[in-house]
Image (spheres, grey):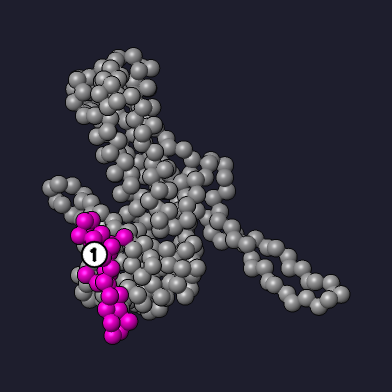
Amino acid sequence: MDEKRANEALAALMASKDPQARQALAELIVEFVQPNHLANQFVSDILDTRALKPGDALVKKTRSNVPVYTLVPGSIPLASEITVEERINFVLDISGVKVTYNEWELEGGEIGTLQEIRNTMAANLRDSFVNRVFNAIATVWTAGNTPDNFTSVGGAITATVLEDAIDRINLVSAGAKVVIGSRTAVTPITKFGAFWSDGANVEGSQNAIDEIREKGFLGKYYGVPVITVEQVFDNLTDYNPLVPNDFILVVGESAGEFITYGDVRTKQWNDMNPTPPQWFLELYQQWGLILDFANRVYVIGGLS
């Protein structure tokens, strides 16, 4: 179905008074907006992710190490009992998106196209999940509790600081998984990320330079993907940034786990008390986060 026909079908559903048509409208919007998919798509760049169903145990379990023995021919090898340790329970939170509109104007197609509705709701859900995870991880380390996993720069990020952080995470995990920060925080990487130096010689990468020129950022540095979190603001009046610009995170493999719990829930109804009536649609998703290997996170703070 092309966009014109899709918009015509959407307008027909909006104009209908039939409750079944209204339910179909809600289902149509929900079909294109999957917070569960969004959460896993973006947060999986930072942490391990799972989608749990109601009734699944909200406990992360880890298996103990299995040692390897040196065998002597003719002997009976030792056996190690497999034990499972329950580490911690997931504490669920809920993120939701709710929209409302004047029903009379709704019938005239005033809310825009399906694509506009989808983009707005999807962006809000993405911001909710990514920002909450991003900010939660950033509070793990400070200069006071572990200097090994924290440094305060007092300026823009430098190659030395970033490489030291990646080296640290490579040492204590299976490897650095991602470098992540706001666009303001990670943009200075473009000043040194397109060049390699052995201390005496400097060599540039034309591919990296072209990427910086075309996109304004660098997708990988020192063998680690760089993720830019786009800045969002609370509202157009106060214009307060919601993504901190004063730190960058380097996160290793399997530092923690993010889960969604259950399917996307929806509520859709018409409030007939006001005149004209008001239409509502709400989507919400339960989720949880565990950071059980915090030493696999490095916080580069004090950026300006």
Q: Residue at x 38, y 27 (%)?
A: 27
**Residue type of the residue flagged with mark 1:** Ile
Of 271 and 163, nearer the camera is 163
> Going by the picture, which residue comes out furthest to the right?
74
Q: Where residue 219 sits: x, y (%)? A: 31, 60
- Residue 157 is one of the magenta-drawn residues: no
Q: Residues within 10 Å of mark 1 (few under 14, many from 20)?
A: some
Question: Which residue in the structure is indicated by mark 1?
Answer: 209
Task: Look at the image and say whether residue 218 sits in the magenta stretch.
Answer: yes
Residue 240's place in the image compared with 155, above or below, is above
Q: How many marks?
A: 1
**Which is nearer the eye, 52 or 145?**
52
Identify the image quadrant of residue 206. Answer: bottom left
User: Looking at the picture, how far across and down is residue 267, in whole percent?
Assistant: 37, 30
- Check the image and report above or below for 189 versus 265: below
Task: Tell me if I can see residue 224 in this picture.
Answer: yes
- Tell me the magenta residue range: 191-219
Q: Is residue 59 left or right of residue 285?
A: right
Decide which of 288, 74 is in the foreground and name it: 74
Query: Residue 5, position in %: x, y?
Result: 28, 21
**Where is the N terminus found, in terms of image quarters?**
top left
- Furthest toward the left, the residue is 237
Nearer to me, 269 or 125: 125
Asked which quadrant contains residue 208, the reply is bottom left
In the rendered image, is residue 14 in sight? no
